[in-house]
Amino acid sequence: MSRAAVVFPGQGAYGPGSLGSLSGSHPWVRRADDLRADLGLEPLSALDAAKRFDPARHLRPSNAWPMIMLAGLLDAERIADDHEVVAVTASSTGWYTALVASGVLGIDDAIALIQALAAAAEAPLPGGGTPAEIIYPLTDDAWQPVDERIDRLDDALDAAGNEVHVALDLGGFVVLAGAEPAVAQVADALPPVTGGSRSYPVRLAAPAAWHTPMRADAIAAAAASLRPMTWERPNVTLVDGRGARFTPWSTDPDDLAEQSIHRHGAMTSDLAAGLRVILREYAPDVVLLAGPGGSLGGACARIVVMEGYRGLRTRSAFEAAQSGPGAVLLALRR
């Protein structure tokens, strides 16, 4: 049985190709639909079974976040049959999936938490501003860091002050979030980059400015609305978006709750830090990418190369390994 690390995706993972990810008969999906009915929200099973992807419905945090969670949990069930899971990390709102998959939260508490925080993400920014987000690459086509881009990004963020923040650090990419005018200013200051069929920086759909201090007040209000929840120690090591570890034998459930509810959504989620800790400390045979979408494949591949894991220090070396029996990354929905 191989030793595996599991990475759960977060906001933005559910896209047109994700329709049909949920089994409407699964107890978790049925329970989520019942709990959402009490909140006056559309059943997730119906959203997932839609014939066409509707961005206004499917990308709304109140709908997308719990669908991403459930898709990840369904994958987690299958993982346990074939792998020894040694550690778990996540990008962004995938952290809430990780809490359930590791036994920290039950499904009822997890749905209550993610729906409250998703509602907070849909609230206006302080002062009524409109949120905006862009994604920008910091590595070249060979997945090596480009100093000029990094320097220009630092300068642009300094000029923007507290109006724009690094919301997600994905190793070779960053997601910048904040109020619309300031994000546009930063985008204009960054050197244009062409990668594949895309020209960067790219504007992201359904921006929420999550993982920025701008959401601290909304998160506090959401936390105050939550009923008491039961938090347990995880049954497998969790590594969060700071690179901090929560282990089965040393975790303080109150500290984990504080980090997950109050701090996680108001600070940078650094997938690179989390995965780097797992690669160095747990040396998994394989990294499994669970949940919908394929956006984390490229990000995790770049992190592996930047870390030089198993001696893979170039894109060509990584791709050669992936094509053979010693693949480092496996996406469960491909």
Image (spheres, rainbow, N blue to C red):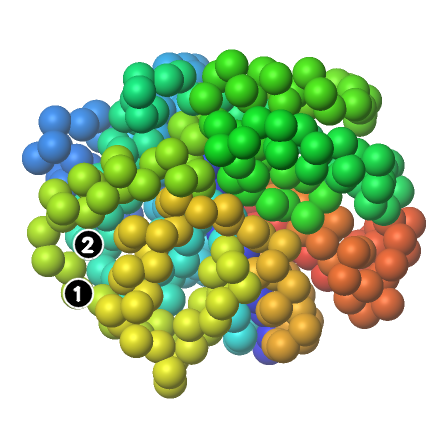
Residue holding disc 1: 230
Note whether 208 is above or below 279 in the view shown.
Answer: above
Q: Amino acid at mark 2?
A: Asp
Count of numbered circles on the image: 2
258 sits left or right of 143 in the view: left
Distance CA(mark 1)–CA(mark 2): 7 Å
42 sits left or right of 180 in the view: left
Q: Residue at x 84, y 35 (%)?
A: 148
Q: Amino acid at mark 1?
A: Thr
287 sits left or right of 71 in the view: right
User: Could you tell which of marks 1 and 2 lies nearer the N-terminus?
Assistant: 2
* One can see residue 33 in this view: yes
Q: Classify mark 2: helix, strand or loop.
A: helix
Q: Residues within 10 Å of mark 1 (few under 14, many from 20)?
A: few
Residue 208 on image: x %, y %: 41, 28
Q: Residue 198, located in which quarter of the rendered image?
A: top right
Q: Quadrant of the N terminus?
A: bottom right
User: Do the numbered discs 1 and 2 sit on residues whose CB atoms are within 8 Å?
Assistant: yes
Q: Residue at x 31, y 17 (%)?
A: 128
* One can see residue 14 in this view: no
Note whether 28 is above or below 294 in the view shown.
Answer: below
Q: Residue at x 12, y 32 (%)?
A: 39
Residue 286 on image: x %, y %: 66, 65
Marker disc for residue 109: 2
Q: Nearer the viewer, residue 220 or 103?
A: 220
Q: Residues within 10 Å of mark 2 (few under 14, many from 20)?
A: some
